[in-house]
Amino acid sequence: MRLLLINANTSDFVTSKVRAAAEACAGPGTSIEAVTGTFGARVIASRTENAIAEHSAVALAAAHAPGKDGVLIAVSYDTGARALREMLNVPVLGMTEAALHVACLTAGRVGLIVFGSRVLGLYRDVVDATGLAGKVAGWRAIDNSAPYAPGDQSEVENLIVATCEDLIAKDGAEAIVLTGAVMAGVPKKLQPRVAVPMFDGITTGVPMLEALVRVAPAKPRIGSYSAPSGRESVGLDPALAAALKG
């Protein structure tokens, strides 16, 4: 099985983290290709930057998805997921929707931790789109950029643990989702210090995508997720223009 991870941020550091976490949790015989955006924000932190990244995500898919069996969006706003479900003939999964679905299958009420107060609204939109907003016990934002650079992470890990404890005590969270691609693999490291299950979008997303590939859902031939075809375009990357023509 061949899976594509699309990081529409332009940070190779983030891509390397998600690739390592994906390879560690992938099943036998699964190969991982992880690609990074070539234009746009280094780390997406606004709606405008996310809109640019959606263009990047579909361009990356047009260039790299041929020959792949499934695509995982390795941006925690699930950037471009709906567009790629329309464009591609293989399963497409957003990392945050994967983590939230798995958490909801594990526990009743879920606490979500985001990095940066500014992006809290973006994540609320992502959760609303899953239809699972009613399962959210509470939200917390940690304003700390340390996870996005190499170095000692002990301080931010202590903050994460304390924030988990606060969600459990004050909001009744029975599971925790750590958002952000850079959090790939962190829940496994911190789980011994937290009393409820913890999840990130990569180590939940890869096994879930493998399962979707095995289910082999049919590509819709009608409706809003049927493939675009015969569309004229101007100034697009040739691979993306070809994908729109069908």
Image: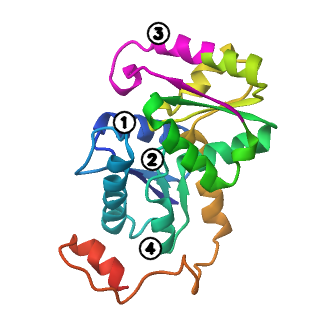
Q: Looking at the image, is 165 positioned above or below residue 121?
A: above
Q: Is residue 145 magenta?
A: yes
Q: Earlier in the sequence, mark 2 or mark 3?
A: 2
Residue topped by disc 2: 74
- The residue that disc 4 covers is 87
Q: Nearer the viewer, residue 101 or 131?
A: 131
Q: Which numbered disc covers residue 155?
A: 3
Crowd tier of the residue under label 1, counting other residues whose Cα lies within 10 Å: few below 14, some 14–19, many 20 or above: many
Secondary structure beneath disc 1?
helix
Q: Is residue 227 above or below residue 55?
A: below
Front disc: 3 or 1 = 3
* Element assignment for label 3: helix
Q: Is residue 174 left or right of residue 122?
A: right
Mark 2 and mark 1: Cα distance apart in space? 9 Å
First-in-chain label (3 vs 1): 1
Q: Secondary structure at mark 2?
A: loop
Residue bearing the label numbered 1: 14
Tell me, yes or no, whether the highlighted magenta stretch contains residue 90: no
Q: Distance from label 4 to label 3 (Cα)?
A: 42 Å
Mark 2 and mark 1 residues within 8 Å of each other at the beta carbon: yes
Q: Residue at x 75, y 24 (%)?
A: 171
